[in-house]
Amino acid sequence: MFKNYITYQSIGVSMSIHRRRFIAALGAGAVASTAGCTQFGQGQSESGGDAGVSGETLTLTTTTSTYDTGLLDEIHTDFEEMYGVTVDAVAQGTGAALESARNGDSDVVMVHARGLEDEFLRNGYGVNRRDLMFNDFVIVGPEDDPAGIQGMSSATDALTTIADAEAAFVSRGDNSGTHTKELNLWEAAGTDPGGDWYQETGTGMGEALNIANQQGAYTLSDRGTFISQRSEIDLTILVQGPIEDGPEILANPYGVMAVNPGVHDNANYDLAMAYIGWITSPGVQNSISEYQVNGEQLFFPEAVSEDPDFQQYVPEGWSSDDSDA
Amino acid sequence: MFFEPIAQLSPAAFDLPFREGYVRSIVFVSLYVSVLAVTLSTLVSIPIAILMGFTEFPGKRFVKSVINTGMGFPSVVVGLLVLFAVSNQGPLGSLNLIFTREAMIMSQFVLATPPITAISLAAITGVDDGVRDAARVLGGTRIDVALVVLKEARYGIATAVLAGFGRAISEVGSVLIVGGNITSADGISKTRTLTTAIQLEARQGQYETAMVLGAVLVTLVLTVNAVVIRFGDSGVGR
């Protein structure tokens, strides 16, 4: 029960001194209860004598879809045991996850909005980006499909049709990766959504799906969250993503990158890189492909490849000419 | 640990899609954070309430209205303020408190202190003047008078502490922001409370499990209230 408490007590000498100073202010009872843990934690790491990161905590800010589907809990145990560390996964949505990292509050980020990731990289906050895995987005809606978009091969045509019909559409409206993708799609469709039929909910994907379900509305969902919730809602996939031969524009790639220790010197860069190395390794990539919810694969690994894809390390479209400019 | 027996009483026997120890650990974190925060708030609030109840000073009305305003302070705003304080870029950034229980205690302390102070103050000033006069006439010192008044006001003060506890344990906005709603991969809560767990279930559309966790929370609050009131009844006989 106190496992976390123990491990983050022994993070590092300076940190635990700070923490103990704070805890001291909390009152004698708290000090008494944690002091024993601290000693225990330190003893553990000394006797263990393993990697220098042992006992440390890695803070990962990530998007709700990786966490809510249960993927991270499933695979993280392996990393924690391998390195003797704790992973604190904070599920925030892509925009907030990157913002936390920008403020130096996390060590590594795993998100799914390439445009926002690129901005993060260009501004110097992130380093060593890797393509991690992908799934896709699908346009879902009520089975009676009032706007008539079923089976359309173009996502932008489908959105335009929904807008023309003024059929109810639920938008995440929360600066998440899915919301960012949705806005990009509207832009590509040349339509500026607005009006009574277009509702921004400001909620997570699960809630947005529920709202769409109750209102008989269309929405854009990542396939993973939709699959994990499909049994409880009446919505159905009307426009498929690339996994089921839908348009490439609905691809949903996830990237992982470390917080730049040159910007935030408190970032646990060693452990962040260990994490990136671990999660892009063939073994863990295999675990990701084997992870299933309701009998369906949710994420498709993308990190292991014979052919080097240099674009994964840099902002999209970047070339060395840029640096001269 | 002193909260451990209470946490073990929690209804982990429900048939829920949770792993072993999950519900118990979020109940523990909820109690740990709220009880510590309310204890600290009480230690600060009651001396302030006594001071304000027994002395007159210029600007007292203003201080009182500030405290009353604090009672209605939105928890999300408190969460944001604490986030700015404990974030790596904030004034307390070097303490590495972001996404920890300590940060959650800080925000709940800020939330619980105004109601505890205001209700205690109301209880103390509400004690009949005759009680003070009688204590004074019987030759009591200032401290004796204060003790008599406190004894009279004990139900009000207990109500104040319960109100603070109720605000702390049922609050979701600030603990979500500063705590990060973290559990470890083995399903043991680090900074996930009952309220943030309910929020997580609702986010995923799992309204039934959210309701069950809500029932656990309500039961917990009722139990704490019953215990405190009972303790107040039997502890000090009149």
Image: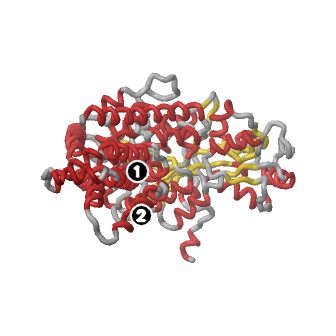
Instruction: Please report the residue visible at 49 percent of the width from the left and 52 percent of the height from the top.
Output: A109
Give the Cα distance between marks 1 and 2.
32 Å
Task: State the image coordinates of residue A152 (x, y, percent, origin top left).
Answer: 83, 45
Q: Are marks 1 and 2 on the same chain?
A: yes
Q: Is residue B70 left or right of residue A118?
A: left
The answer to whether B20 is drawn above or below residue A83 in the figure is above
The answer to whether residue A109 shows anywhere in this view is yes
Instruction: Please report the residue visible at 30 percent of the width from the left and 34 percent of the height from the top.
Output: B233
Q: Earlier in the sequence, mark 1 or mark 2?
A: 2
Instruction: Please report the residue visible at 30 percent of the width from the left and 36 percent of the height from the top.
Output: B232
Q: What residue is shown with label 2?
A: B65
Task: State the image coordinates of residue A95 (x, y, percent, origin top left).
Answer: 56, 57
Q: Is residue B194 left or right of residue A43?
A: right
The type of residue carrying mark 1 is Phe
Q: Chain of mark 1?
A: B
Q: Is residue B153 left or right of residue B65?
A: left
Q: Nearer the viewer, mark 1 or mark 2?
A: 2
Q: What SS does tag 2 mark?
A: helix
Instruction: Please report the residue visible at 43 percent of the width from the left and 26 percent of the height from the top.
Output: B11
Give B9 or B137, whichever is nearer the viewer: B137
Give B26 or B157, whichever is nearer the viewer: B157
The answer to whether B225 is drawn above or below residue A176 in the figure is above
Task: State the image coordinates of residue B194 (x, y, percent, origin top left).
Answer: 46, 38
User: Is mark 1 in CB contact (under 8 Å) with mark 2?
Assistant: no
The type of residue carrying mark 2 is Ser
Q: What SS does tag 1 mark?
A: loop
The answer to whether A154 is drawn above or below residue A294 in the figure is below
The answer to whether residue A127 shows anywhere in this view is no
Crowd tier of the residue under label 1, counting other residues whose Cα lies within 10 Å: few below 14, some 14–19, many 20 or above: many
Which mark identifies residue B99? 1
Task: State the image coordinates of residue B129 (x, y, percent, origin top left).
Answer: 29, 54
Quadrant location of the C terminus of chain B? Answer: top left
